[in-house]
C-alpha cells in the first residue's frame, strides 16, 4: 500500500493538537481540506483513526497504534531525503549556504572568495531565508552550513562559531518624535508598537523584541513581516519601530526610515553554524575556517 507522507503529517498534526481547528492552523490549510485528508487516510487504511465529538478529535485504538509509529517513520524519511540531497550536492561539488538578511555584512563576499580560493571548482550556493526561518534552512537540513544572527531556535543542537558582535540600533519612521535624538534609551521605546517577525521563530523573534530586557513590560505589535522590504515599508508607513543590527543603517537605508543607536539593550552576534555530524566534513570545515579567518582579519563591527 502506498500512502502519501502528506497524509501522515496531517494525521500527526490532528493527533497532537486534538482538533482539526488547531491542526489546520498549524499546517496553514483549511479545515475542510484537512478533514478530507484524514478521511482519505482512513479509507486507504480501512480503519477509523479518530472519534469525533464536540470536544475534539480523540484517537481510536488503531489511531493510537499509528500515532506511536508515524513520527519515527517521518523522521527516517526526512533524514534519508536530506542525506540524499547532501550527497548529491557533494557529488556536484556544491556547498549549500543558508543566509539571513545581510548575513555576515561586508564579510560575506570576502568569505565566499576565500572559500573559492581554498576549494577551486566548488560552488557556494547562497540561499536567502525569510525571517520566519531564522536558522536559514539549517534545522531542516536544507543547507549544509549557515550564516546567522544569534540566538536562533534550536541553536543548542548545532555547532556555532561566533564571528563578530555589533550593537543593536532602532529603526524609526523618519518623522518619529524620537528620531532627532542622537541616542535613544531602550526604556523610552517600551510603549512603542514594534514591527515583528512571525510568531513561529519564538526565541529569535523575542530577541529582536528584546523581551528579556523589558523588565516584564509587555510588547506592543504594530505589524508582522517576513522580508526586509516589507519590514522597511511597515516602519516607513508608521506601523511601528524595530530593533535592528547597526549595519542595517548601511544595508537597509531608505527614505522614510531613520536609524539611531540604542542604550540599555544587549548587542547582536553573527555566527556560522553547522550540524554536529558534519564536524568531520572537510568542505564544511574549510568554509568555517574561511568565515573565522575573514572576520578576524576584518576586526570588530564598528558602532556607527
Image (cartoon, helix red, strand yellow):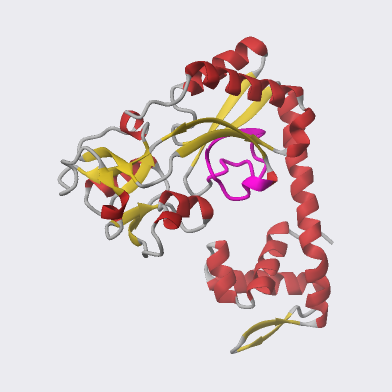
Considering only vertical position in the picture, is 71 above or below 273? below
Q: Is residue 99 visible?
A: no
What residue is drawn where x is 72% and y is 63%?
A: 8
Using the image as rendered, state which of residue 131 and residue 190 is in the foreground.
190
Using the image as rendered, state which of residue 165 and residue 282 is in the foreground.
165
Considering only vertical position in the picture, is 168 above or below 240? above
Tell me the chief SS of the magenta region: loop
Position of the N terminus, as image quadrant, is bottom right
Using the image as rendered, state which of residue 87 and residue 112 is in the foreground.
112
Considering only vertical position in the picture, is 198 above or below 35? above
What residue is drawn where x is 46% and y is 52%?
A: 205
* x then y, percent, for residue 253: 28, 32
* x then y, percent, for residue 251: 35, 30
Along the horizontal axis of the image, is 154 left or right of 172? right
* x then y, percent, for residue 246: 36, 34
Along the horizontal axis of the image, is 13 left or right of 248? right
Magenta range is 134-156
What residue is drawn where x is 49% and y is 28%?
A: 104
Residue 91, quarter of picture? top right
Q: Is residue 179 visible?
A: yes
Considering only vertical position in the picture, is 17 above or below 86? below
Along the horizontal axis of the image, is 56 left or right of 189? right
* x then y, percent, for residue 11: 70, 69
Amino acid at each position: 500500500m502506498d500512502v502519501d507522507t502528506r497524509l501522515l503529517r496531517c494525521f500527526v498534526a490532528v493527533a497532537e493538537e486534538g482538533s482539526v481547528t488547531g491542526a489546520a492552523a498549524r499546517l496553514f490549510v483549511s479545515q475542510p481540506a484537512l478533514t478530507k485528508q484524514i478521511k482519505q487516510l482512513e479509507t486507504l487504511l480501512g480503519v477509523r483513526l479518530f472519534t469525533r465529538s464536540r470536544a475534539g478529535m480523540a484517537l481510536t485504538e488503531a489511531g493510537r497504534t499509528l500515532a506511536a509509529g508515524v513520527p519515527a517513520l517521518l523522521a527516517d524519511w526526512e533524514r534519508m531525503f536530506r542525506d540524499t540531497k547532501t550527497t548529491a550536492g557533494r557529488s556536484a561539488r556544491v556547498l549549500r549556504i543558508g543566509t539571513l538578511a545581510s548575513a555576515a555584512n561586508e564579510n560575506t563576499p570576502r568569505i565566499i572568495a576565500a572559500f573559492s580560493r581554498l576549494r577551486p571548482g566548488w560552488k557556494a550556493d547562497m540561499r536567502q531565508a525569510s525571517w520566519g526561518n531564522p536558522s536559514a534552512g539549517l534545522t531542516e537540513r536544507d543547507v549544509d552550513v549557515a550564516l546567522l544572527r544569534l540566538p536562533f531556535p534550536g541553536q543548542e543542537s548545532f555547532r556555532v562559531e561566533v564571528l563578530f558582535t555589533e550593537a543593536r540600533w532602532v529603526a524609526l519612521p523618519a518623522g518619529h518624535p524620537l528620531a532627532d535624538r542622537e541616542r535613544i534609551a531602550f526604556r523610552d521605546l517600551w510603549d512603542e508598537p514594534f514591527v515583528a517577525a512571525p510568531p513561529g521563530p519564538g526565541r529569535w523573534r523575542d530577541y529582536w523584541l528584546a523581551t528579556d530586557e523589558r523588565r516584564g513590560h509587555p510588547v506592543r505589535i504594530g505589524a508582522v513581516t517576513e522580508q526586509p522590504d516589507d519590514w522597511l515599508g511597515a516602519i516607513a508607513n508608521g506601523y511601528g519601530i524595530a530593533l535592528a543590527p547597526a549595519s542595517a543603517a548601511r544595508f537597509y537605508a531608505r527614505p522614510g526610515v531613520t536609524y539611531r543607536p540604542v542604550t540599555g539593550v544587549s548587542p547582536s552576534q553573527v555566527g556560522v553554524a553547522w550540524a554536529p555530524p558534519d564536524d568531520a566534513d572537510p568542505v564544511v570545515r574549510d568554509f568555517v575556517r574561511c568565515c573565522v579567518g575573514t572576520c578576524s582579519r576584518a576586526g570588530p563591527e564598528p558602532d556607527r
